[in-house]
């Protein structure tokens, strides 16, 4: 973007509101022309300054809006991050609980106390059932 104040120092050398040209009374029309050109230059300078201020104002407003939008996105991202951290912690706690339950079950299976404290191996239990069935007189061979 071009700098609207690039030629301002050159214009300021022309604008000397407190100084009249030398011997201005000898040529009043030249003095009037000088005053007119000085007033026109001052008006142009003021217009450029107004435009620069308007541009700066709009840039600042755009930046403020962008900063507000980024702060909103940051808050949403932080909220989402906290949500997923909480979800992860909950899932981790459930997984660790399940792991402890599985370890306890494995330990009780290994110790032989998984279902019944006086549990016996399967073949011994099935022999016992067969012995009890024979004692009652049931025929288990036909149920195979």
Image (cartoon, rainbow, N blue to C red):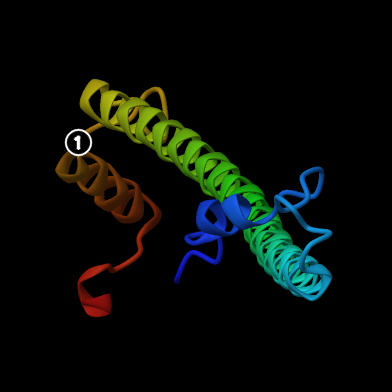
Residue lying at the far front of the rendered structure: 26
The residue positioned 75% from the left and 63% from the top of the image is: 42
- Where residue 13 sits: x, y (%)? 58, 50
Left or right, 113 with respect to 39, comes to left
**Within 10 Å of the Cα at label 1, are there few (<14), some (14-19), or many (20+) other Cα atoms?**
few
Q: Is residue 10 above or below residue 50?
A: above
Left or right, 82 with respect to 131, comes to right
The residue positioned 15% from the left and 44% from the top of the image is: 123
Quarter of the N terminus within the rendering: bottom left
- Where residue 48 sits: x, y (%)? 67, 68
- Where residue 63 sits: x, y (%)? 63, 58
Q: Is residue 74 above or below residue 121?
A: below
The residue positioned 72% from the left and 49% from the top of the image is: 16
Q: Is residue 139 above or below residue 142?
A: above
Within the image, what quadrant is residue 82 found in?
A: top right
Q: Which residue is mark 1?
A: 121
Within the image, what quadrant is residue 122 found in?
A: top left
The residue positioned 66% from the left and 63% from the top of the image is: 52
């Amino acid at each position: 973007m071009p700098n609207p104040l690039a030629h301002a120092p050159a214009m300021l050398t022309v604008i000397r509101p407190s100084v009249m040209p030398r011997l201005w009374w000898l040529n009043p029309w030249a003095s009037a022309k000088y005053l007119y050109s000085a007033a026109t230059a001052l008006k142009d300078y003021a217009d450029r300054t107004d435009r620069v201020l308007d541009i700066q104002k709009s840039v600042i407003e755009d930046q403020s809006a962008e900063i507000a939008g980024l702060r909103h996105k940051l808050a949403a991202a932080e909220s989402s991050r906290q949500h997923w951290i909480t979800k992860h912690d909950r899932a981790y706690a459930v997984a660790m609980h399940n792991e402890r339950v599985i370890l306890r079950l494995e330990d009780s299976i290994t110790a032989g106390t998984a279902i019944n404290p006086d549990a016996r191996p399967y073949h011994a239990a099935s022999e016992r059932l067969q012995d009890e069935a024979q004692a009652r007189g049931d025929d288990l061979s036909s149920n195979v």
